Image: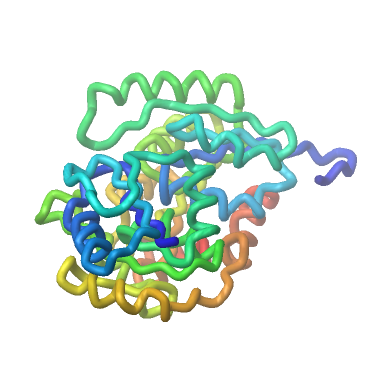
Amino acid sequence: MSDSKNVKQKKVMLVASGGGHWVELMRLTQAVEDCSLAFVTVQDDYRYQIDRFNNARYYTVFDVTRWNKIRWIQTVLQLLWILVRERPDVIISTGALPGFFALRLGKFFGARTIWVDSIANVEELSKSGQKIGPHASLWLTQWPHLETESGPKCKGAVI
Amino acid sequence: MIFVTVGHQMPFDRMVKAVDDWAALNQRSDVFAQIGSTKYRPEHIQWAHTIDPNEFQERIAQADAVVAHAGTGTILTALEQQTPILVMPRRAALLETRNDHQVATAQRFLEMGRVAVAMDETELPAMLEKLSQLSASDTISSGASPELIQAISDFIHHEL
């Protein structure tokens, strides 16, 4: 952890749904070890995995998909509450839809945002990954063949 | 011990039944399956609907081999724990998932030499026979590629 004077510790919010999204997110944490961290996911039982990060916060929101739009509003409100409390400098998500919402909302709070599309999306970006493009400060795919001039960039993978 | 896992989102009857039939035929008593919302009820192997993430990691670490749907969470966890893994992709047409991304995932990780693949339940028994010969893929690092870690770290700290 950097404690040099004049350098304020960056606040980073990391958002992922369960399963592969979460496993991929955890593999990115080396990049944020010197930051103040807030994790946002959709279930409580990953909490033990963040014990190794000093003072990291852990939040859960309702899991939502494209197919249950009624619940979107609940998740959005939960994310707004977390953003008000956390005021992150940077938001990173590996998907899926809750992460998409977090990035979109985060912009209104002045956060810079990173979308890392899941390595599971080999043939095309995820639906959320396609739509987040214009809204993400850094828009990444993990597959070189999905990189395009005006689209996402590939800067390595979680493996 | 063989650890079978299909995640939590949708049923995967084809795979669970094929493993159960194989275990019966070969009198295997060392198989445990996490079957999620699968409708089929195994009769010849131990099973549970869900297990928590901690137990999931433990079971993968202790298993001789993992047999799973082609989900990246399972594949990455098996690679981290250096446990050999055989995957069978879910198919959208059979309502096992919402698109065929697992087919591409299985093929890509196969090309990289990271997993063994049974494309469907007819290929699964023969692959299960060969399970004991599977070796774990090369060790993967505990985190993402250095390039990706650097790109994210640079972005955070240098306002690029």
Position in image of residue A156 (x %, y %): 52, 67
Query: In the displayed structure, would residue B21 be above or below residue A49?
Result: below
Number of marks present in the image shown: 0
Residue at 19% of width from left, 49% of height from top? Answer: B98
Side of B89 where A156 appears, left or right = right
Determine whether, in the image, residue B34 is placed left or right of residue A22: left
User: Which residue: 36% across, 59% down?
Assistant: B29
In the figure, residue B91 lies in which quadrant? bottom left
Q: Residue at x 42, y 56 (%)?
A: B74
Image coords of residue B71 (percent x, y): 35, 56
Q: Does B86 sit left or right of A9 as displayed?
A: left
Residue at the front extreme, as displayed:
B27
Residue B71 as seen in the image, left or right of residue B76: left
Residue A120 lies, with reference to residue A50, above or below; the image says: below
Above or below, A102 relative to B97: above
Whether residue A23 can be seen here: yes
Tell me, what colour scheme is on the image?
Answer: rainbow
Report the residue that reaches farthest toward the right: A5
| Residue sitting at x 28%, y 23% | A71
**Where the N terminus of chain A falls, by quadrant?**
top right
Residue A94, x across and y down, in percent: 45, 48
Depth order, front residue of A11/B113:
B113
The quarter of the picture where residue B44 lies is bottom left
Whether residue A148 appears in this view of the structure is no
- Taking depth in this image into account, of B85 and B43 the one nearest to the observer is B43
Q: Nearer the viewer, residue A129 or A134?
A: A129
Across and down, in percent, residue A97 comes to: 35, 38
